[in-house]
Image (cartoon, rainbow, N blue to C red):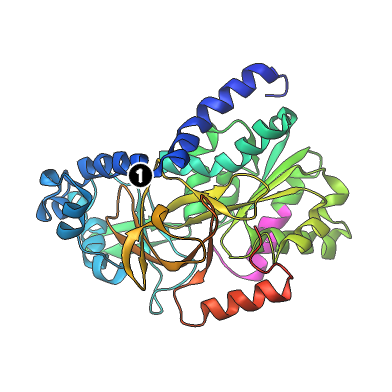
Amino acid sequence: MSNIDPQAGAQMLRSQLQPWHQAIENPAVAQDEVLHRILKDFSRTDYGAQHGASQIETLADYRRAFPVITYETVKPVIERVMAGEIRALLCEEPVGWAITRGTTKGESKFIPMTPTDLRLRISAGRAMMEFVASTGRFDLFAGANLNLNFPSVVGTVKVGEREVTYGYSSGIYTKYVSTFTPIRSVPSQDEIDALGGGKSIKDWDRRFELAYQKCKELNVTLVGGVCPTAIRFARYMRKVYKLYPKDLWTTQIMTLGSVPGINTRYQASLNALYGPAAIREIYGATEGMFGQQMDKQRAWVPNYDLFFFEVHTPSGIKMLHEMRPGEMGGLVVSTPILPRYRIGDLILALQAPYFRCIGREEWWTPLRYAWDEFSTFNFGRL
């Protein structure tokens, strides 16, 4: 896309971003449309049928019929799907199984990824598209995206008589949808997968060496993926080649996720390693891509047109868009796969439409966030 016409490119980006922008302007309407869309999917599953998905008309009906669930409560149903009972929870065959990098009570979570789910995950590109649309930097598409994602296949697990392969959601996403994005990811996900699914320092050094060799002569305009991995790669380059990424590439933008505080705690380190690139936060998890940074305001904006968002606050359950600035609560998402799933993240509402994930739902998370804001002299500023 090196010779993209700016006018045609701007029109293309507007069409891609318009559903998101419209949903931000009227989140109540967008969320109602999402609810009825996912209820159609739920009605085609055993779990949805058991909860009367096809008879639900209103939000109140949905809340009465479907309880808030956690991974522990839905795990037996997921295990049935892994054993071959697809309709127990899904209305279509999974294309892959994602494993969390974190743990739930000491065990990794297994989350199915379906074609519908993967199409929604393309939304992770909205941060990059918004940047290009607002700056006119269409030359970004002429470069390469430095692919530092985790492997899409790391192992197998036997469930009943079935052997199920699993990997990380970022790798599965890249493998299946990178062909639909306007910029090439290097190295390819197949090349990363070929190195195996190990998690040791040597395993990551091999992935970093692959990325360096494949990209050292390229024009890397975009870096996307997990924030700590991007920092580790830069340090690898410095240790092995006495170079920083900024010495090789003029990176325009970094779209990163996985940890809180990317725009406050990590921005200085990222710019020191990669140069004065724009930093844009992606808020996602193994279960989905739920929001991304829209502009220079250092917070993310929900994908109200794709997922259904509730939040459990001290005053009770409410819609995410109903939160007041300064209010905190535990996020409850409904995806094409998981209805009313309490993801375990603590969300802070800022000035609409901006939010931050400040960490996991632990009693000490607000205290740590307050300390981070103080130590970085941010003090809650957008």
Residue at image location 12% in from the left, 44% down from the top: 54
Residue at image location 23% in from the left, 51% down from the top: 59
Name the quadrant containing residue 4: top right
- Above-or-below relation of 120 to 79: above
Name the image quarter holding the C terminus. bottom right
Q: Secondary structure at mark 1?
A: helix
Quickly name the residue at label 1.
28
Name the one closer to the observer, 263 or 173.
263
Please say whether residue 208 is one of the residues in the magenta stretch.
yes
Name the one closer to the observer, 17 or 147.
17
Name the image quarter holding the N terminus. top right
Measured as percent of width and height from the top left, residue 343 is found at 39, 64
Measured as percent of width and height from the top left, residue 330 is found at 40, 67
- Above-or-below relation of 133 to 370: above
Say if residue 194 shows up in the picture: no
Name the quadrant containing residue 93: top left
Measured as percent of width and height from the top left, residue 166 is found at 41, 57
Residue at image location 27% in from the left, 39% down from the top: 37
Residue at image location 49% in from the left, 55% down from the top: 284
Please say whether residue 335 is one of the residues in the magenta stretch.
no
Q: In the rendered structure, which segment of residues is drawn in magenta?
A: 197-209
Instruction: Specify the principal SS of the magenta part.
Output: helix
> Left or right of 320: which side holds 64?
left
